[in-house]
């Protein structure tokens, strides 16, 4: 028995598109968003963080089901626009926005520039003044508090992100100093990979309270409060997935209470991993099997160059993503295998001591839950393999949504500086 995506055998997809390959299940992708949408109160709008998977078709599919967009670069902004998102449903976040990026934010008329420093505020003011416009700016706060339970804790620490809450509380007259800025909201992002419901609720409660205090203190209205997100998915043994029903039961009253007091305020949650991770499988083909001093190795045609996250997130002990033998999913996993990629570095292991059936050359190995932080968060140029193909299965049909890089593509942007000319120049001197 084979792993299937919407009824299509994985070997069929691998034969048609080649390997290594990312396959996304469009039903799973839409289902994540719709499932959350149906449970969370409607006042909370979901913004898709393109960082987690900036594929144009993934973005378009999510947008088609009502997701807005949170972008952090020119390419992500362009992706969101091409995917059909309206400027009023796009926010731009990031600590190092260039003038080119800020110009695009102003010229496109996006909903909010999430400003991360006083210096950035000066640049926005200058650029908006030059254009004779008023820039919609939300302040990203680096909060004084932190809440435990995240894979990466953001609050209460020195960070390059946002403006320290203490500094803002002291910034009397800030709002009046910037004539071409409309302070319209607050954004806080507390961390990522949160797998407990309670810290998410607690984060949200405190962010909403902080937003109220700051808007009172500094004297601006809350058109938007962005409560971040950081909702995780379980990758590793011993982890459990979020209980969305439980999350909704706890979170909705907090949101509703704030909404009752601020009925005009747009409430935003930013989600990347939670929306995209489950839908994706990274598919590689076994090139060789070998035994080295008693350890089984399956050497495949793709590795950490496309899936850096699989080497383990923030832990000393290597923990594996869920890895399966896709072309024989029903066979008992009675052996222990290291799954290696093609890179010439010992770190190129997708999984260590993975329980698999006896592996043969030509088998397809899959890393599940891999739709977030895949190729675009990996060193795809390392050893010149380039990006893998990406395929989206939608309504029972498969679509190539990103072509595999060819060696010519990787070389296309290089210019050969003629060594012959250099040599001549030196000898004639
Ligand atoms: C990375 C990031 C996200 C998305 O995080 P996930 O854990 O993938 O949901 C959202 N907002 C900001 C500001 C980020 O930096």
Image (spheres, rainbow, N blue to C red):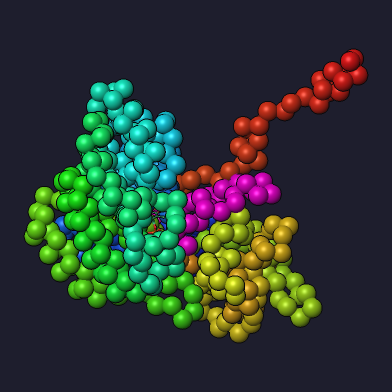
Q: 290 or 253: which is nearer to us? A: 253
- As for residue 383 lying within the magenta part, the answer is yes
The residue depicted at 15 percent of the width and 69 percent of the height is 253
Find ligand 1 in the image and state its quadrant. Answer: bottom left
- As for residue 190 lying within the magenta part, the answer is no
Query: Where 272 sits versus 406, above or below?
Result: below
The residue depicted at 37 percent of the width and 32 percent of the height is 123
x and y percentages locating residue 135 in the rendered image? 26, 34
Answer with the quarter of the image where residue 32 lies.
bottom left
Instruction: Using residue 46 as the reference point, say whether residue 409 is left or right of it.
Output: right
Answer with the quarter of the image where residue 244 lies.
bottom left
Q: Can residue 71 be seen from the camera position used here?
A: no
Q: 318 or 267: which is nearer to us? A: 267
Q: 344 or 406: which is nearer to us? A: 344
Answer with the quarter of the image where residue 358 lies.
bottom right
Q: Which residues are magenta?
A: 370-393
């Amino acid at each position: 028995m084979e792993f299937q995506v919407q009824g299509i055998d994985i070997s069929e997809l691998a034969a048609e598109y080649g390997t290594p390959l990312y396959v996304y299940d469009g039903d799973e992708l839409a289902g994540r968003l719709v499932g959350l949408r149906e449970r969370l109160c409607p006042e909370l709008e979901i913004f898709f963080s393109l960082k987690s998977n900036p594929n144009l078709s993934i973005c378009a599919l999510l947008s088609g089901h009502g997701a807005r967009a949170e972008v952090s670069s020119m390419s992500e902004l362009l992706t969101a626009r091409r995917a059909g998102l309206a400027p009023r449903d796009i926010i731009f976040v990031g600590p190092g926005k260039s003038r080119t990026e800020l110009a695009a934010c102003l010229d496109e008329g996006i909903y909010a520039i999430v400003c991360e420093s006083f210096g950035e505020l000066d640049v926005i003011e200058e650029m908006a003044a030059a254009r004779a416009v008023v820039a919609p700016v939300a302040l990203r706060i680096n909060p004084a508090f932190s809440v435990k339970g995240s894979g990466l804790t953001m609050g209460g620490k020195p960070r390059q992100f946002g403006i320290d809450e203490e500094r803002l509380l002291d910034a009397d007259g800030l709002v009046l100093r910037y004539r071409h800025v409309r302070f319209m909201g607050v954004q806080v992002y507390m961390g990522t990979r949160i797998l407990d419901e309670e810290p998410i609720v607690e984060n949200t409660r405190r962010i909403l309270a902080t937003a109220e205090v700051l808007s009172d203190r500094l004297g601006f209205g809350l058109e938007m409060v962005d409560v971040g997100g950081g909702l995780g998915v379980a990758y590793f043994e011993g982890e459990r997935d979020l209980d969305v029903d439980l999350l909704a039961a706890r979170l909705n009253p907090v949101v509703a209470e704030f909404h009752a007091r601020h009925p005009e305020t747009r409430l935003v949650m930013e989600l990347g991993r939670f929306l995209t991770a489950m839908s994706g499988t990274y598919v590689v083909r076994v090139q060789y099997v070998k035994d080295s001093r008693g350890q089984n190795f399956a050497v495949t045609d793709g590795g950490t160059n496309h899936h850096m996250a699989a080497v383990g997130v923030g832990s000393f002990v290597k923990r594996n993503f869920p890895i399966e033998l896709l072309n024989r999913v029903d066979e008992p996993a009675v052996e222990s295998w290291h799954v290696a990629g093609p890179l010439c570095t010992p770190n190129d292991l997708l999984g260590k001591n993975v329980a698999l059936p006896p592996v043969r050359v030509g088998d397809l190995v899959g890393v599940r839950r891999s739709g977030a932080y895949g190729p675009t968060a990996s060193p795809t140029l390392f050893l010149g393999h380039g990006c893998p193909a990406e395929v989206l299965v939608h309504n029972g049909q498969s679509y190539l949504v990103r072509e595999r890089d060819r060696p010519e593509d990787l070389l296309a942007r290089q210019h050969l500086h003629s060594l012959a000319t250099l040599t001549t120049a030196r000898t004639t001197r």
